[in-house]
């Protein structure tokens, strides 16, 4: 997502896979100033990789972390743009109900929907 909530890259994974291991792959070839994500992305690998790149980590720490790290709560409020994007995607009935049988055709329609969202 960019600062306006427009999609920049989509990566389709099987439904049983967790989202957080895909985060670093989605950020390759980008040089963001900050990364805003929810607590599920608060892993040592992600935080350390972003710190090495000099990226501001705006991810609230999990409650079970021994050392709670600070984050910019005002910037974290922009995470609602991500949620609004997924709600826009679910507005396309074909995506919400997953009519497509193959991953390739499902991803193609997601790309089409993202293009339509960009054109708004």
Image: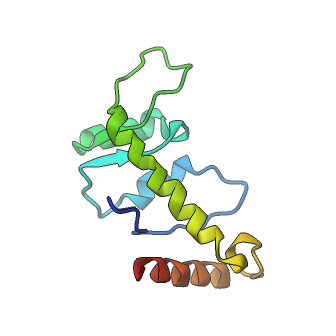
Seen in the image, is 119 located left or right of residue 16?
Answer: left
Seen in the image, is 27 located left or right of residue 15?
Answer: left
Q: Quarter-wise, where is residue 37 in the image? A: top left
Q: Residue at x 54, y 47 (%)?
A: 20
Q: Is residue 49 visible?
A: no
Say if 6 sits above or below 118 in the image: above
Q: Quadrant of the C terminus?
A: bottom left
Percent from the top left, x then y, of residue 78? 39, 48
Say if 60 sits above or below 13 in the image: above
Q: Is residue 39 visible?
A: yes
Q: Residue at x 45, y 56 (%)?
A: 81
Say if 108 sits above or below 8 in the image: below
Seen in the image, is 35 located left or right of residue 65?
Answer: left
Percent from the top left, x then y, of residue 15? 71, 59
Q: Quadrant of the N terminus?
A: bottom left
Percent from the top left, x then y, of residue 69? 37, 23
- Given residues 5 and 49, the one toward you in this image is 5
Q: Quarter-wise, where is residue 68 in the image? A: top left
Q: Residue at x 53, y 67 (%)?
A: 11
Q: Residue at x 52, y 59 (%)?
A: 84
List the single residue furthest toward the top: 66
């Amino acid at each position: 997502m960019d600062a306006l909530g427009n999609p920049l890259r989509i990566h389709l994974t099987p439904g049983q896979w967790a989202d957080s291991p895909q985060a670093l792959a989605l950020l390759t070839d980008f040089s963001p100033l900050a990364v805003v994500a929810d607590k599920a992305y608060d892993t040592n690998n992600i935080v350390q990789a972003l710190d090495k790149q000099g990226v501001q980590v705006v991810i609230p720490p999990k409650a079970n972390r021994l050392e709670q790290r600070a984050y910019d709560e005002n910037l974290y409020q922009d995470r609602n743009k991500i949620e609004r994007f997924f709600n826009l995607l679910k507005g396309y009935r074909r995506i919400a109900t997953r009519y497509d049988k193959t991953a390739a055709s499902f991803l193609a329609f997601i790309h089409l929907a993202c293009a339509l969202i960009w054109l708004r």
